Each structure stands twice: as structure tokens, then as C-alpha cells.
Image: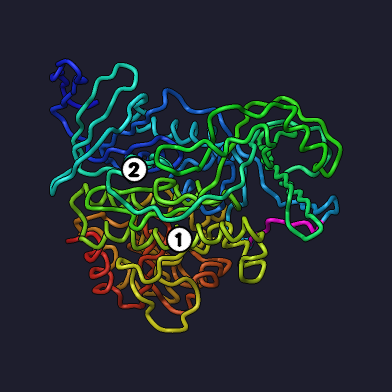
Amino acid sequence: MEGTCFLEGDSAGESPVAHTDGHTDVLVVGAGPVGLTAAAELRRRGVRCRLVDRLPARLPYAKAVGIQPRTLELWDRAGLVRAVLEAAVPMRGQLTYVNGVEQPRLDLKLPPEVPYGFAALPQNETERILEEFLNRFGTAIERNRELVSFTQDADGVTSRLLDVVTGAEEEVRSRFLVGCDGAHSVVRKGLGLGFAGGAFPEEYMLADVEVDWSLPHGYGVRAMHRDDGGAVDDVLVCIPLPGVRRYRVSMSVPAELSSAAAQTGDGIAHGLEGGRAPELAHIQAVLDRMSPQPTVASTMRWSSVFRISHRIVDRYSDGRVFVAGDAAHIHPPTGAQGMNTGIQDAWNLAWKLAAAVAGATRPPLLDSYDAERRPVGTEVVGRTVRHAAEGVQADPGDPATVMMRQAQLLVDYRGSPIVGRAERDGTAGPQPGDRAPDCGGLATAVAAYPLRLYDVLRGRDHVCVLYLTGPNTGAMTELATLAADFPAGRPTVCAVLADGVPADDLPLPAYRDERGEFARLYGARESTLFVVRPDGHLGARLTLPAGKALVSHLQGILGS
């Protein structure tokens, strides 16, 4: 904690309140995957940040387990993806059974240029990896700290934190407050945000067990029973986890474990319930009637009953206070969309807050968080509710499009107030607001192996990629000068050269597009400047000469 601390107000009936003579730039509340992502991205950019959580320790639960390819791309950008790849297991597809009859197998296949596939990792392991990454920047989770209340003014936010062990209260002054504090968010309630939606009547059991079946490794299992009218009256869903035949299983709750009467004070029934937890015998009973192969469950690490709601806030921010993850949207776990959407919320917000803290921002930048992420949250809530009721086949589009959407690779911010417009209608390749795709086959004079575009982007914020179909030293010199002189953000600049363009004595780092993958995937038939944002989306796509347009675009976001 920054600054010197002293206590006052130790009168009867009052908790002592600690005041600090220092400030923090951003206070993040909630140290799940979303809050850890927000804090890590802020600290990686040099922003002073505190991360508080009311829990005394990380929960040992495999709640959210699916890792989407888009999330892995972002973790690549930060430089922490290797730890995830070493800890996770691949999700190769899904085996589906209806009334014991195997249905066509679903294989999770993506285009070859997508660098990562689907993966599974217990949430507590995801949190461990993110926490260790955050610790590299000298920041640790402050545990047993609960947000009690907050007020904001034109210059910042004043928050009251309760030490749940000692009862002491601390007053914290920050420039911004980010609520990543879950479905029962104190931040959301403090802002008075609407949280429209409802709850599903069904309850489920959740458990982390090992089974002895011989089903293919890396495949999830979904077994359903339909009654004579075609309605699903029993279900078993198993997601593979790291370990030998280890799965997170979910299934309907038997009557003796029903916690339907349990209700939180805010009326939101979502997540793990307290009370009686399922025993191994309850899990085995469902496996006996629903498993596609006879199997015995063992080594149960934990179990719980859980409920599902679907809700979304009416806005993602108010003044200097923001919400992300479950604090902003909750929905069925179908397709492993929730945690990944929250992580991407946090990433989208963090680079913008970092720019604001640095004093390098225009008003539309922070406003764009709601403009960009709330439509994504709305779409995810609607889609997962449809899938919960009708299955993934309810998703419109051809199978390849459905798979890309599930992988969260089709999220776009077209129409955002901070992205440019397409230079001309009908242009092939990604447009401003779209995800910037990866590509391979980039060669340099020094490296003896080809690079990927994401190797070039890793660890950087705004990157200006100048694609040249012919010699144009003038454009390269202009771009290098503009980037060097730009006072806010200092974008990184590089060139990608079509095969045959001379690469000697250039004023920019240059990579040769030896296999033509960049040109193909970016639809670049002529020399073009691509501005890639810190979150891996295109901010602008500009034809040459692009100097004035680039300055206008960056000044509109980062100021001058």
C-alpha cells in the first residue's frame, strides 16, 4: 500500500478508518480472471493499481474451464501464453449422445492461420497463472478486503474498504474504479445500473472427478435423454481437465439436493450455491444412467449445486467507474463464453485507462468501452440463452462461421467512435474494428526461421504496419518520423514487404511477406497502412499517402 497510514474514528459502534497520503491510479475490485487481467494489463503499462478481493485465498474450483482461441491470442500479446499452453489440455471436440445413441461427432477445427485452438483449464489454475504474471510487476492481490461503498467526483473516486478479518476500514482515493466483483457486484449496485434478465428454473450439480471410461482424449461429452414428447429430461455434460481421465461434470440435481428456496439478498440466483454439496454417490447415479460407457467415478476434488441466470447491465460505465465480466453480464455457461468475454472486457478497458492515466486521451476513448463491449455482451447473453434451450444448432451461419464465433474470433467494433472507416466499399480483408488476423511466413535478413505477425505485435501497444507492394522509402520515412514525434502513445512502426520489394537500407524494421500470407489475409492488393490497436483489433486501414490520416486517427484517440 502506498503512503503512510494512520487510524482515526475509533469510537463506539464505528470501525476505524485508515487514510493514506498516497493515491492509486486504478482500484480494481475482484481478483478472479477478469480482475486479474485488468490489473495485469494496467501494471504492464506502468499504471499504479491496487487489486482487492474479499476472499482469503483462491478458491480451488474448476468453475469456468473453457479457454477460447481469442483469449489465447491476447495472452500471447501480453507474453504469458506459454504458461497457459503448458498447463491446459486441448479441447478437440464434443461427443454427443441422445438416449444412448451416438450422434455425429463435433470436431473443433479452425482455419490454419488461427494460431491457437480450443483449450480447457480449471479456473483456479487460470487465476494462478494470471496472479503469478501480475506479481512480476510488483503487485499482489490484497485479500480479505471488501468494497463497502464509493463516491465519485470530477477528479476521482473515494472508496471505503473493509478488512473482513479485523473490521478496520480504509479510505482509498483513485482516479478510476473497476468492478470485476461478480454477479452480486457491489460496484454495479453502487452505480445503480440496471441488470435486466431472469433466472432458469433448473438447478445443476457440478463436480470435479475422474472416470475410467475409454472415450477419446480431449473430447467433451454431452449425453441427453429425451422423453416421448422430445423434451430433454436428463442431461450429463463432461469437460476434460488436466489429469488422467479427469473431467468437470455437470448434471441435473436430484430432489434431495434441491436448493430452489435458496436466494441471495439481491434476488440474483447465479453461480455456486451454499448448503449441501453432492456426494460421489450422487454423481455416480447420474453416470450409471447417462454415461455412454459403463464407468466408475473417483477422486472427487469438489462438488456443488449451481444456478444460472441471464442478465446484462444497461451501461458498462458511469463517469470514472466501470464494470466488467460477471458484474456486467451473466448467462448460461454454454460454449464457455462467460469468462472469456469478461477477460476481453478487461483487456479492452485496461489499455484505454492506461492512456487516460497518462493524460493521453480524448473523451471518446473511455466512452468507447461501453460502445464496444456492451453490444458484445448483449450478443453473448442472447446466444448462450438460445444454445441452452435449443443447442448450438440454433446459431445461424455455416459450420465454419459458427466455429469462428464460438472461438470469439468474429468480435468486431465496426462503428465504434474510435475506429476509422473503410477506405472504400468492397475492400477485401479485415476492416477497421475487426480482429487483426495472424499470418506466417514473415522473413528477416537475420532470423533463420519465418516469423508470425503476432511475434511482431507481442508486447506492444499501437502498431502501425505499413504494407508495401513496391519501393516507397518516402512513405516509410514519413511514418517513422510521425511515430517518433507523436507525443502520446508512441506507436511502434514496421513494414511488411511484398516479395521482390528491396529490403536494404530502410528507415523501418521490415519483414518480407515470402508466402504472401499477409497480403492474402489482409486483402492488401496495394500499399496500405494498418493500425493495430493494443487489443489486437484494427483501428484504421489507410491508403497511401497516409500521414495526415494517421495523425488525425491517433489524435482523435490519444490526443496530441
Q: Residue 53: horizontal and vertical position, in percent?
A: 37, 31
Residue 133 picture quarter: top left
The image shows residue 113 at horizontal and vertical percentages of: 59, 61
Marks 2 and 1 sit apart, C-alpha to C-alpha, by: 18 Å
What number is the disc on residue 378? 1
Q: Up-down: is 525 above or below 316?
A: below
Q: Is residue 280 magenta?
A: no
Residue 556 lies in quadrant = bottom left
Task: Assign the C terminus to one quadrant of the image.
Answer: bottom left
Q: In front: 348, or 72?
A: 348
Q: Residue at x 48, y 55 (%)?
A: 454
Image location (x, y in percent) of residue 251: 69, 41
Near-viewer residue (257 or 300): 257
The disc, 2 or 1, on the residue closer to the chain's N-terminal end is 2
- Judged left or right of residue 355, residue 472 is right
Magenta segment's dominant SS is loop
> Residue beneath label 2, please?
179
Q: Is residue 505 visible?
A: no
The residue closer to the viewer here, 367 or 277, is 277
Residue numbers of the magenta segment: 103-110
